[in-house]
Image (cartoon, rainbow, N blue to C red):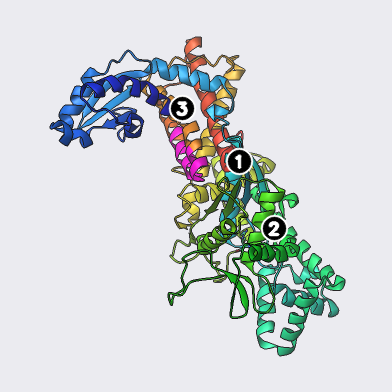
Amino acid sequence: MRELHMPISKALQPVLNKLNLTGVDINSIIGKATDQSQGDVAIPFHRFSRELKKSPQEIAEHVANQIRPELEGIGQVTSKSGFVNIVADPSWVTKRITELSMGQNCGISRDAKRKVVIDYSSPNIAKEMHVGHLRSTVIGDSLVRILESKGCSVIRENHIGDWGTPFGMLIERMENLKTSGVKPEEALSDLGEFYRQTREIFDSDDDFRMRSRNRVVKLQAGDEETLVIWRQLVHISLEHFKEVYELLGVLLTDKDIMGESYYDPLLPSVLHRLNESGLVEINDGAQVIYPGEWVNREGEKLPLIVKKADGGYNYATSDLACIIDRVERLGAEDLIYVVGAEQKQHFEMVFASARLGGFIDPNHTTRHVQFGLVLSPEGGKLKSRSGGAVKLLDLLTEAVERAEKSVAERNPKINPEERSRIARIVGVGAVKYHDLKADRNRDYVFDWDKMLSFEGDTGPYLQYAHARINSIINRNKKDGITNGSMIFNLREDTELRLAKEILRFPESVNIAARDLAPHRICQQLHRIAQAFGAFYEKCPVLVEDPILRSERVSICTITGTVLKTGMGLLGVEAPERM
Ligand code: ARG
């Protein structure tokens, strides 16, 4: 509870002064107590032991005795093992929770007015989307919501791979199939297969390979007949992606598509600008720049190839054009890329090149939001039963089917229509939450039973807590107890604990926004839901005393609102009932 830090440092300052510990940044030593039964915040005194020639225990005990508890916010002060532990004063907690309930947006402050572009999802045309794209889509979508809630103006960009040499062979193959009477939709009904087969022909058939190379030239030259097939290819692939996006319930729409092809006409100007700054060198016939100290396995300095010896441009060149476009056309200040960890070096080199070339200045930030792999429970990368790549649509469909079974088990009387509506929310929510809850830098294991469980740190657990709160509120509404009063009078331990966890929610959003780490919000929501469980067990809501009852309904109401808001930031829907 950061709001507690102010009164605490006020209370501590005179005590530290008396001990001659001046120049200590108090705020930097205040932390969250690891053992919540001891206090809400803890201050360690071990580091002053040598200077004061006293044991940490003695110092902490002395400080605890000197702190004047009458300062607002400070409740019980104790010491243990060299820490001073401070409990927030219950009336202060009550006041804060009232403010949070009356205010906007569950206490999330809108203080970041940056213009941000988030590049996420970004699958490749005529290829199946894989789980890496799922991660990018889910994490990126959550970051959009989090940064918007903090007041940023966020532009979504789906940087699809829709240009480059592979399109020669794909277009050629489409054309061949068309002449033999196969409809384009049919040919592309299985994108992964289409790509794999085309690749096979390309590798084995000299004639096809030559025609494919010709196609690339035609595509680059804007040959209309070639462009028609290209557009078809793009269109049909996008329909496949859209199906996944719709099922996932993400914010991405057609308007957010900014594929590599868009930047193609801008590539010569990238080279031109780099040349003007004198950065371009010739290396084996290619035009390259050396953005920094990256080396290859042989220890040679690694160039960023801007234009290949054969005259073609590169993925990196396209990303440089893209930076120019985002900064100069869109006016972006912060550039965020949600892409797998395997592209780490690519982005480091591109960002360094953009700085060297003067495309961005010190006011701009560039961040590669990387993430780990999705592993199968048996170990290794997640694979389908047949051993190939997992199709996202199949995976999400299975999630919904499994969720439908457990919804039916828990609630046999529910009508089929509502059951399937809730199953989609629960199944997809489970997959998303499971993806978001771990530190994104780590790999995670895709475990159906764990993610779909209604117990533990899962999406369904949060959704269920929210739905249960909703039903408590509705039950009270029937008795004429509404939640309009929002008057709190926190007494019980479980009430106070729940209120404190709720007060920590806006802080978790701040940290998630700062570190681009949605899992910090997951952690806090899970704690809130757990604290709610403990509260509900100890503090019945349906009590005789109407005032007490209304206070408890108020606690339920703010808990439900915070859970729903928080899940909203993760892109996880919260059904009203389950
Ligand atoms: N299409 C690429 C892939 O699937 C990801 C693109 C990421 N965005 C970017 N601006 N490079 O690997």
Q: Amino acid at mark 2?
A: Phe
Q: What is the x, y in percent for residue 374?
A: 50, 60
Q: 98 or 147: which is nearer to us? A: 147
Quarter of the image where one finds residue 557: top right
Whether residue 408 appears in this view of the structure is no
Looking at the image, in which quadrant does ligand 1 appear? Answer: bottom right
- Identify the mark at residue 241; answer none if there is no mark: 2
- Image height of 89 relative to 522, above or below: above
- Image height of 184 relative to 67, above or below: below
Q: What is the x, y in percent for residue 9?
A: 34, 24
- Identify the mark at residue 503; answer none if there is no mark: 3
Of callouts 3 and 1, which one flags the residue occurring earlier in the amino acid sequence? 1
Q: CA distance from mark 3 to mark 1?
A: 20 Å
Q: What are the residue bounds of the magenta stretch?
A: 511-528
Q: Is residue 31 magenta?
A: no
Q: CA distance from mark 2 to mark 3?
A: 39 Å
Local secondary structure at mark 1: helix
Q: Write down the residue under mark 1.
A: 145
Q: 396 or 325: which is nearer to us? A: 325
